[in-house]
Amino acid sequence: MGLDGQSGAFVGFRGEPGQYEVTEIVFKAKASISNGESVHFFLADGDETTTEHYIWFDVDTAGADPTESGTQHEVAIDAIATAIQVAAAVHAVINAIGGITTVASGTDGLVTLTNDYKGLVTESSIGNGTPVDSITVTQDGSDFDVANVGRGSDNRVVCPHCNGQWFMVKDSYCIDDGDVPDFYDGYNVGGVVDNIIFLCHCGREFIKPKTDWAAMLGSN
């Protein structure tokens, strides 16, 4: 196993391990929504890509998909009336998609959408008509940006050997010959892999691929 000699600079963790996109949408009552009106939203998938989806309203069982960009999801509201009921119908449809969690507050037609994966996504928007009173992003999604790592001491992780805290990291890569020692957390795949190397005051190093960075940090 070897380490690239070009990556000798030590850096600290920048401080933000990424966060989920959270959006609040206030839907109107059925009387103010027409067939085919739509709202678009985007999901992070945990692999630095996003997918576009939209819901469209079928008001009287005679509606038709407006065939907009993204994956369509019909919300049938022919048998309901109030904004609260519309929000409940939207919640049931979106929450069943997977990769996103919704909550219908039970007041004012409010539905809160939270992506299940951290990542930067395009903000939700109206596609057709005016089926909502407002769309508010309350938390922008973001990935951890390895390229902008800077010196710092926050968001440390616990050393599994001495329970101390990893206090520095090294941006490097590993040339793995297939026999990585156990104290490298069992990471053992042949080839060249981009890594972040954590150092502890007990003298041990801990290596993880950059793609595992945010997941490893968790809430620490």
Image (cartoon, rainbow, N blue to C red):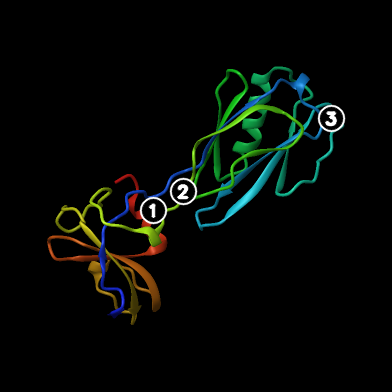
**In terms of secondary structure, where does tag 2 sit?**
loop
Disc 1 or 2, which lies upstream in sequence?
A: 2
Q: Tell us which disc is closer to us: 1 or 2.
A: 2
Question: Given the current orientation, which residue lies at the most extreme left position?
Answer: 202
State the residue at coordinates (84%, 30%).
Answer: 61
Q: Position of residue 31 (x, y in %)?
A: 78, 19
207 displayed left or right of 27: left
Q: What quarter of the picture does the N terminus occupy? A: bottom left
Within 10 Å of disc 2 (Cα), the crowding (few <14, some 14-19, many 20+) is some
135 displayed left or right of 160: right
**In terms of secondary structure, where does tag 3 sit?**
loop
Q: Which residue is mark 2?
A: 142
Q: Which residue is mark 3?
A: 61
Q: Tell us which disc is closer to us: 2 or 3.
A: 2
Quadrant of the rendered structure where residue 28 is? top right
The amino acid pointed to by label 2 is Ser
Q: Which residue is mark 1?
A: 215
Q: Position of residue 82 (x, y in %)?
A: 70, 17
188 displayed left or right of 63: left
Residue 126 at least partly seen: yes
The amino acid pointed to by label 3 is Thr
In space, the residues marked 2 and 3 are separated at their CA atoms by 39 Å
**In terms of secondary structure, where does tag 1 sit?**
helix
State the residue at coordinates (17%, 60%).
Answer: 200
State the residue at coordinates (55%, 41%).
Answer: 100
Rendered view: 169 above or below 42: below
Within 10 Å of disc 3 (Cα), the crowding (few <14, some 14-19, many 20+) is few
